[in-house]
Image (cartoon, rainbow, N blue to C red):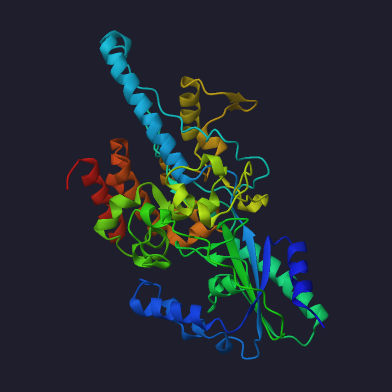
Amino acid sequence: MLSGRTIKERARELGFDLAGIAPLNVWKDLEFSRQWVETGYNGEMRYLENPRRFDPLLVLPSAKSVVCVGLVYNAPLPYSTEVEENRSQELESRRQKAESRSQEGPETSRAEPGSVPAPVRSSEPETDTRNGQRTTDNGPFSNFHFPFSDPAPRAWISRYAWGRDYHEIMRAKLEQLRAAIKESAPEVETRVFVDTGPVIERAFAHFSGIGWMGKNTCIINQERGSWLFLGVILCSLELAPDLPAPDRCGSCTACLEACPTGALVEPYAMDASRCISYLTIELRGTVPNEFRAKMGSNVFGCDICQDVCPWNKSYQPSALSSQQTSYQHARPLHTGEVMRPATTTIPEFHPMIVEASHFTIAERKIREQQARDNGQRTTNNGPRTTDSAGFSLFNPPLEALASITEEGFRLNFAHSPIKRAKYRGWLRNLAVAMGNSGDVRFAPWLERMARHPNPIVREHAAWALDRLRGEP
């Protein structure tokens, strides 16, 4: 008879990082989810009210066990909190240098009278994100670009959306696992789910031993952290369940304290209607005024509550800060041991390179001349610019994202989670990020968006313009 151990071994052979067997009767966690919806924490996500989500027997009446799998998607690149910290340090350093130059005298810091600032080149991130990564279909871009030489503000896209749509990757692997189960037990009935059906994967993942539900409401694994995609197979086989993963959050409240919008209303409870991920992805209408400034540079999703989680960090016991000592008991380490977050080697989960090759001849000549004026490096085919070479979705230039036309959005993100936001939601999010950037160079783009046919886009563009002007 097919055993849970055999299924888990096969899951790992297929490339899953984690696998476990959960019983069907996880009623306590399912009841918590039902009460969560009744409280209204689901916002406008009405699909979460489906009663089948709270009883797996309504999905598969013959179900007796749940096969759970996890796949790490963490690309080995800095976290959003680290990027923001580095940006703050860079701005402070630049401010100090400017003050120093002003004290030395105007002749050392001013350009020649009548000179025109050189156009900006939005550089690639220093970390090389190209090796082993895929590119997208080329999509048309607009001609929006900065006319000044100051560094361009950057945006943040949630880590899980950097690469190919995880539903496609996970589903394909799960179908292979289901086929292996059916091959050994042809009579078995199964249903496969990857965050799209009436099943609460997180509840079963907890009871399968894959991880515990953290105070940030993510599943956290002791060895691999919380950057996990989850999938389940409901099946009619009676399989021996694994033990639930014990809660190891301890007294840590880092995620609650870091959430900009206060979405984590208490440990283990998130008001999704306040979450930046919900606001930038699921919400179709107007972002409440109280959250816009707090969204910062996030244009699709948010990683902050996972970025600050100690289970996603590297450190030695001797290097614990005063803040970390409060949860030291929650993560026992041996002297000299270094705990590192798990990272993925799957190319599809690394940041895609969005290519921009559909410029008119006139536009291309202008941009190539700008590249030469800026002293950019060249290739065998001429100057290499950000526009012709594309850009990475890791901390991308906000300017570049704003240059994507509706057709380009459709083509570039056809196999990306980003398509869920829709183009009008994309423009809305970009407008908010531009307003938060404090960079008046976005004013022309925002003025165009303030005349957009969609009223939601117009409203957020007008808000961003007011914010750039310093108006309340």
Q: Give x and y (percent) for residue 378.
A: 59, 24
Apparent side of residue 138 relative to residue 401 in the rendered image (left or right): right
Q: Give x and y (percent) for residue 173.
A: 70, 66
Q: Residue at x 59, y 68 (%)?
A: 245
From the image, which quarter does the N terminus lie in? bottom right
Q: Nearer the viewer, residue 254 or 261?
A: 254
Residue 189 lies in what quarter of the image?
bottom right
Q: Residue at x 40, y 73 (%)?
A: 45
Q: Give x and y (percent) for residue 454.
A: 31, 60
Please tell me whether residue 271 is drawn above or below residue 304 in the rendered image: below
Please tell me whether residue 46 is drawn above or below residue 406 in the rendered image: below
Q: Is residue 114 visible?
A: no
Q: Give x and y (percent) for residue 94.
A: 36, 25
Q: Nearer the viewer, residue 12 or 60?
A: 12
Q: Nearer the viewer, residue 50 or 309?
A: 309
Apparent side of residue 136 relative to residue 147 in the rendered image (left or right): right
